[in-house]
Amino acid sequence: NNLRGIVSALKKGEAVWFAPDQDYGRKGSSFAPFFAVENVATTNGTYVLSRLSGAAMLTVTMVRKADYSGYRLYITPEMEGYPADENQAAAYMNKIIEKEIMRAPEQYLWIHRRFKTRPVGESSLYI
């Protein structure tokens, strides 16, 4: 759960799963577009892990089969052209997440309050 341990594991060639589509709050986040919402708090964790470890990054998405007999696992090739700027990296990551969600948008965890952290001065998107 700590950054140092995760970076160490990545440098040893171990696999680490990280959920970059969660709202972790203002600290350690950039505001970037996500679907139709212009300013969404997006963790810089992916950017930090990439820079500190140099590890290959790829996405893993699981989609429930239509007949409920199991799941299909999608593993993408390594990301290329990952931005060196944290704000650009947040926008880049959100585009990738959007693409993965669109595989089966009805299965995404929309109940998660993804838009709870707002830029200073902007009102909540929730009632």
Image (tube, rainbow, N blue to C red):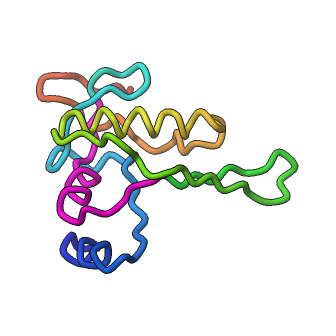
Whether 66 is drawn above or below 40: the answer is below
Q: Quadrant of the N terminus?
A: bottom left
Residue 44 belongs to the span the image colors magenta: yes
Write the residue at 16% across / 39% down: 85
Q: How many marks?
A: 0
Residue 91 position within the rendered picture, expressed as x and y whole percent measured from the top left = 30, 32
Task: Give the x, y percent position of residue 89.
Answer: 25, 39
Q: Which residues are magenta?
A: 40-58
Residue in front for this viewpoint, 64 or 73: 73
Residue 78 horizontal side relative to residue 75, left or right: left
Task: Look at the picture and state if 123 lies above or below 52.
Answer: above
**Residue at horizontal 32%, vertical 46%?**
23
Q: Quadrant of residue 66?
A: top right
Residue 119: quarter of image: top left
Quadrant where the C terminus lies? top left
Establish if 91 lies above or below 121: below
Residue at figure coordinates x 73%, y 51% from the top left? 64
Q: Is residue 72 left or right of residue 95?
A: right
Percent x, y of residue 107:
64, 43
Q: Residue at 36%, 76% (x, y): give it.
A: 13
Whether residue 51 appears in magenta in the rendering, the answer is: yes
The percent position of residue 59, horizontal first and vertical second, equals 48, 52
